[in-house]
Image: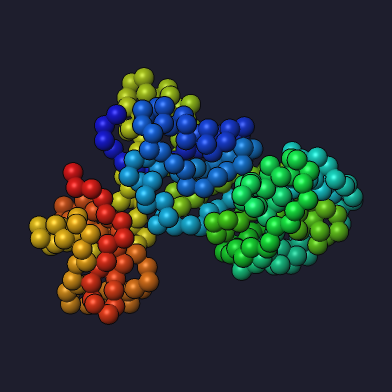
Amino acid sequence: MDNEDGFIIVNKESGCTSHDCVKQIRRLLNTKKVGHTGTLDPEVTGTLPIAVGSATRFIQYLPQVKTYIGQIQLGIRTKTDDIHGEIINQKNWPKISDDKLDLYLNKFRGKIKQIPPKVSSIHVNGERAYKKSYKNEKFELAPREVKIDELTLMNWDPIRGIIKIKIKCSAGTYIRSIARDLGEILNSGGCLLGLKRISACGFDEQNSIKISDIEKEKVVSKATNFIIPTISALNHISTFVLNNDEEINFWQTGRAIKVDNNFLNEFGTFDYKKPVKVLDKRHTLLGIGFFNEEQYKINPKLVLNAK
């Protein structure tokens, strides 16, 4: 393949794992340096950004907010907290109004603590939780703080007991846990019926493509045509431009770059704890740095090799 780095936004279909998608992209691009930006359960569909080449090093600097549309089935509690798991209990759900249901959803808005599903990829004493669960081992998972930026009640079907929601949340949020916990609050039990991710890490489903469609297009083009350049994924962070060859040499050898007053004036409200993307005058991405307030320098954190 050509030496192209960036992101392919896969529209993941149900039934395949995130790692399956990575393996398929590796095969299509004939490269090993491929990684996804966050696991989706096999049954979950939607937006799965996959990093190619040096873009794998920038995953941690992408926006971490993700948006889903999900359906919650009340009246059923399962071992996996989704509809595909073994049923633990079944009960009637309450006949409540949309307004009252929305008030219950307030308990899941903002910063909350949730216990992840026992069938999850979290490590417990060196082993994935889902593996322990499948072996019927007894263990507990600690609550984790997550942030729910938006939670919208899209539809409530009191006849079938199905709630449709749209949720914008931080990385690490389990929608299955929200389904389970809402069911507990309503004293009916609940599980996730279906889930689609419509945006992740700054990429929307409008930018996504099914791997099967990449396969078809490859007949008349190259799979690399679907790669979004890494720099396009970093529009949310500030830019620092190196002015000359000496600064570029300093940067490429891991040395700090002195910041002039023009930079300080331009970024008067600059958050010095956040990263900056470093470019040359041709707007070629050279890496990621952090500002040192005491020395008035940009310290290299991630340096790309010169091409």
Residue 70 lies left or right of residue 184; in this view the side is left
Residue at the extreme left: 245
On the image, the x and y values in percent for residue 78 come to 80, 45
Count numbered badges in the picture. Answer: 0
On the image, the x and y values in percent for residue 215 come to 43, 24
> Is the residue 210 above or below the residue 179 in the image?
above
Picture residue at 71% right of the left edge, 63% below the top: 105
Does the rendering let one see residue 228?
no
On the image, the x and y values in percent for residue 110 come to 61, 68
Q: Quadrant of residue 265?
A: bottom left
Q: Quadrant of residue 2?
A: top left
Picture residue at 27% right of the left edge, 62% below the top: 300
On the image, the x and y values in percent for residue 285 come to 25, 52
Residue 187 lies left or right of residue 41; in this view the side is right
> Is the residue 113 above or below the residue 293 in the image?
above
307 or 270, which is in the foreground? 307
Residue at the extreme front: 125
Residue 292 lies left or right of residue 190; in this view the side is left
Residue at the extreme right: 91
Residue at the extreme bottom: 294
Q: Quadrant of the C terminus?
A: top left
> Is the residue 96 above or below the residue 306 in the image?
below
Residue 122 lies left or right of residue 189; in this view the side is left
Picture residue at 33% right of the left edge, 32% below the top: 224
21 or 45, which is in the foreground? 21
Does the rendering let one see residue 61?
yes
Picture residue at 75% right of the left edge, 40% below the top: 135
Q: Quadrant of the N terminus?
A: top left
Q: How is the image coloured?
A: rainbow
